Amino acid sequence: MKSVLLFLLIFTSFSLHAQESLEKLLKKHNTKSVPYISVQELAMPKTEAVILDAREIDEYNTSHLQDALFVGYDHFNLAETTKNLKDKEQQIVVYCSLGIRSEDVAEKLQAAGYTNVTNLYGGIFEWKNNNFPVYNLEEKETEDVHTFSKTWSKWLLKGNRIFKEEKEDE
């Protein structure tokens, strides 16, 4: 019984610390110019939203949220993206790995007049960390999540971390 309680205490402490650290990371990189939506709220059946993936194509191809539209980040094209967004009042959720790049893309949508844009808090990492499914290019459920780099991999607590090896300085 003591070992179970100790495990729960450690797990809860770790989870709270991870959440605080994620909050700190997002505070450092984001301005909160775009409201967040939690992974739990997005996963609710009543939530009807267009979901936009603001990562790079190799990240999207590895895994993405179901029905997410790839819009990219480095080569994000507002005109091309808005062709798929007819109603400027519809709910739009933008996500990336953690919610940093997605804020930038969401800001561009807001500037174009879209009024119901949110940023997925913690991105696909938080989605997977909460045991929600991700899908590969064949739309089959997968455990793989592209974590961009080894450095960013620490934020993915569940699933298989996929990233290109970083080159050592010569």
Image (tube, rainbow, N blue to C red):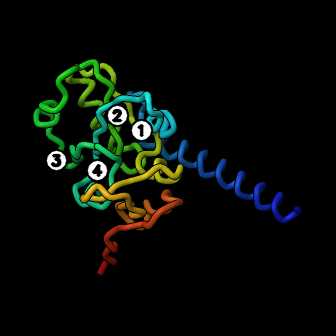
Residue at point 48%, 40% (across, down): 39
Work out how far the residue at label 4 is from the one at label 3, CA to CA, in angstroms.
10 Å
Please say if 138 is above or below 113: below
The answer for how far apart the CA atoms under marks 1 and 2 are is 6 Å
In the image, residue 64 lies at what x, y percent? 33, 52
CB under 8 Å between discs 3 and 1? no
The residue wearing badge 1 is: 120
Name the residue at 18% across, 43% down: 76
Which callout, 3 or 1, points to the residue nearer the camera? 1
Q: Which of 53 and 101 lies nearest the eye of the viewer?
A: 53
Q: Secondary structure at mark 3?
A: loop
Determine the image quadrant of residue 117: top left
Whether residues under marks 4 and 1 lie with C-beta atoms below 8 angstroms apart, the answer is no
Give the Cα distance between marks 3 and 1.
20 Å
Q: Amino acid at mark 2?
A: Val
Q: CA distance from mark 4 to mark 2?
A: 13 Å
State the CA–CA distance, disc 4 to disc 1: 13 Å
Tell me the amino acid under the disc marked 4: Arg
Can you tell which of label 4 and label 3 is closer to the viewer? 4
Q: Which residue is mark 2?
A: 93
Q: Position of residue 145 (x, y in %)?
A: 39, 60
Residue identifier under label 4: 55
Q: Residues within 10 Å of mark 1 (few under 14, many from 20)?
A: many
